[in-house]
Image: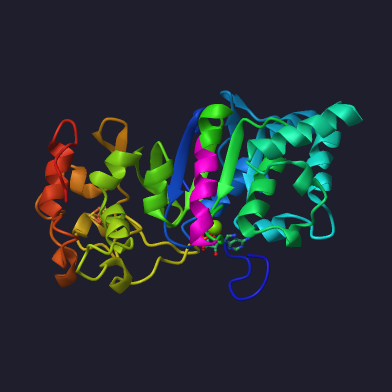
Amino acid sequence: MHSGIGRGQVVHAVEDISMVLPAGTVTAVVGESGSGKSTLARLLTGLIKPTGGQVLLDGEPVGTGARARRKYTSSVHLVLQDPFSSLNSVHTVRYHLERPLKLHTKLGRAERAERMRQLLERVSLTPAQDYLDKYPHELSGGQRQRVAIARGLAVGPRVLLADEPVSMLDVSIRLGVLNLLDDLRSGENLATMYVTHDIASARYLADCIVVMYAGQVVESGPATQITDNPAHPYTQLLLSAAPDPARAETPVLRGRGAPPSLVNPPAGCRFHPRCPFAMKVCAVRSPEPRPVGEDHVSACWLHASELDDDQREPLSATATGPAIGTATAATVAAQAESADGATDAN
Ligand SMILES: Nc1ncnc2c1ncn2[C@@H]1O[C@H](COP(=O)(O)OP(=O)(O)OP(=O)(O)O)[C@@H](O)[C@H]1O
Ligand code: SF4
Ligand SMILES: [Mg+2]
């Protein structure tokens, strides 16, 4: 922190994360506000430098020279939450699409015009002629987000980092943009990272889900597995907090405090001050990620079999508190022991 209260202190916004974005798949990153999702996306674009670790493209570390950086930035594109602020209000759609083509390609004027037409058609803004000379304020939110995505596709990126791309859009047009991302996954073979608060939309769109809490990954795995059979207490609480008209009980997460400060995060498991199942060990030792199913990993001491009775002691009177849905510590532990992680926690 460079100014204000806490000046000179370090924010551990993202720590100990290792993740892969395979081509042709959507990986959703979900978590509460402040969990480090945008920081992770910005690290992957190169907008901020990691204090440790590496970013690899095709298994190769990204070079530091100007040429390597240019190649990397044309391969990776970031789509932001607010399409209005990500487009320049004094320039037309034509300007936004033509600029990356001029900077990153050697296309002539006629080829650029054809490419711009194709790009607008790719994001379903047709006929292209109707949009090229419009300014951002003349478009709807969904249309602006489509222009921002088309601009990202201009130089044929291989990685699309979409940071809450639909959260500022009207509910009625969100689905259209999500379906566009879905279409681009297969059509352009893009490796997409979809950052969201909304675990329901992650299930709709993503192949895999990565759940972040306080700058770390607490659970990851196939999207259906994570939403149907969550192994980590935090994921279960997140799911219990998702809007569901069929659920009668109050979501449990809201009543269980707030995410911790990332200047001095809690020792041990960072979730222990809020966890209904916290045990003595959770307050002192950080849990390692463990497999709990096929390609399904969760970092929680409930999955460990090596703990003694003292370590398993509940941390406080509230630690065995409200069950999450009908899940209990016992069902989570049973799930971990089951070879395929298929025990139904709900
Ligand atoms: N430049 C910065 N200086 C100080 N703290 C920062 C900075 N950038 C991020 N943080 C802190 O790092 C943490 C993670 O922020 P980040 O924006 O990545 O969270 P997020 O998961 O994207 O949240 P949201 O869902 O609200 O967008 C937050 O506590 C934030 O206050
Ligand atoms: S049981 Fe312990 S390790 Fe698991 S989430 Fe709760 S506090 Fe963390
Ligand atoms: Mg964010």
Q: Residue at x 32, y 71 (%)?
A: 254
Quadrant where the N terminus is found in the figure? bottom right
Residue 153 image position (x, y, % from top left): 68, 36
Q: Is residue 176 magenta?
A: yes
Q: Main secondary structure of the magenta part?
A: helix
Left or right: residue 193 compared with residue 318? right
Q: Is residue 148 magenta?
A: no
Residue 17 image position (x, y, % from top left): 46, 42
Residue 83 position by quadrant: bottom right
Residue 54 position by quadrant: top right
State how the image is colored. rainbow
Q: Is residue 128 above or below residue 191?
A: below
Residue 40 image position (x, y, % from top left): 54, 48
Q: Look at the image and give the residue range highlighted in magenta.
A: 170-182
Comparing 204 with 14, the one in front is 204
Tag count: 0
